[in-house]
Structures are given as C-alpha cells and as structure tokens.
Amino acid sequence: MAKFKKKQSEPTPGSNDSQSKIIDKIDIPETEKSEDIVNNSKEPSKDPQIIDVAKSVKDKKLSTLFWIRIALGIIAGAATTLLLEDIEGEERRWTSIGFMIIVFLASIILAKGMKMQLPSSDRKKIVTQGIGSYVFLYLFTWIVTYTLTHFSDTATGINL
C-alpha cells in the first residue's frame, strides 16, 4: 500500500476572502416571526377539522375491516378442518383454497356494506386491506387445527 504525505504548505492567502464575498452576495430572506403566525390565526378554520374527522372515521372503518378479516381467517381456518373431514387427498386442499376465497369474497361484500366513503384512489383498499394477514392466518390455523385433531393418527412413537 502506498503512503501519501500530507501537504505541509500553508493555505493560499486570501482563500477565505473569496468564500466570504460569495456568502455576502446571497440575500437570505427573513423568516416569519412566531408572534405573527399566532396573531393571524385568531379565527380557527373549520375545514381541517372536518377533514381530520372524516379521515379518522375512514381509518377506523379500515381498521375494523382489518380485524374482521383477521377473525375470519382464524375462524375459517379452524372450520375448514371440521367441514372438510370427509374429503381425502388432493381434493381437500383445493376445496380448502376455494373455501378460503369464498369467505374472503364474503368479507368484501361485508366491507361494501360498511359504506366507507373512500376517495377513488383508495377504492382498492376494500379488497387489499388485511389480505396477507387473512391468508396466512387462515393457512396457519388450518394446519394447526388439522395437526391437533390428527395427532394421535400418526405413528410418532409417543403415546398420549
């Protein structure tokens, strides 16, 4: 690795003078005083409050939809184990996936019944809100309940 020597010479005289001249030429606008802002806002505006209330109602309804889908995922996953007990093999898997889709479509109809006032850019939130959590909790609950109900059927060597 090559070693470099530090420059030992003194700075060029007047190098700091050129920077100070540039800074002096720039006009910096004065900032508003906080007293002016307080004095000008004596009359409260009602528009931001209405927007905030509408936004909080929308967020509450989207949060409610999220938790409804979480609960539906857990309930439907557990119900799948009991409802599809008679179906064997590959048909059980595809029937379970179909059941999961049907329950999700029912949650979309339920969401439309909640009459959320969403802007046109947020219309797809009715479908996408909580979809990942719904699918994973459905599958997790289905696997766990199936494993617990068929635990004694497997030859694990453990007697319970």
Image: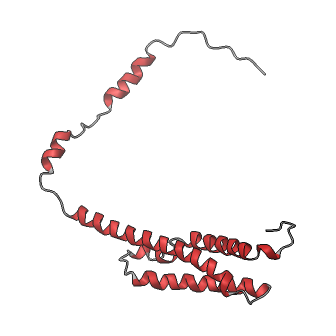
| 129 to the left or right of 55 | right
Q: How is the image coloured?
A: secondary structure
Given residues 46 and 120, the one toward you in this image is 46
Q: Residue at x 78, y 87 (%)?
A: 88
Quadrant location, the N terminus: top right
Q: Determine the residue located farthest toward the bottom in the rendered image.
A: 86
Q: Quadrant of residue 78?
A: bottom right
**x, y percent for residue 109:** 47, 85
- Is 46 drawn above or below residue 82 in the view shown? above
Please count the marks in the image. 0
Rendering coords of residue 75 (x, y %): 57, 77
> In the displayed structure, does residue 61 sit left or right of residue 35?
right
Closer-to-camera residue (64/130): 64
* Apparent side of residue 51 relative to residue 18 in the rendered image (left or right): left
Q: Quadrant of the C terminus?
A: bottom right
Q: Position of residue 125 (x, y in %)?
A: 47, 73
- Answer above or below: position of 71 versus 46: below
Q: Foreground: 32 or 139?
A: 139
* Residue at image location 24% in from the left, 36% down from the top: 30
Q: Is residue 151 left or right of residue 144?
A: right
Measuring from the top left, give residue 53's x and y in whole percent.
28, 66
Residue at 43% of width from left, 68% of height from top?
Answer: 63
| Vertical comparison of 14 with 86: above or below | above
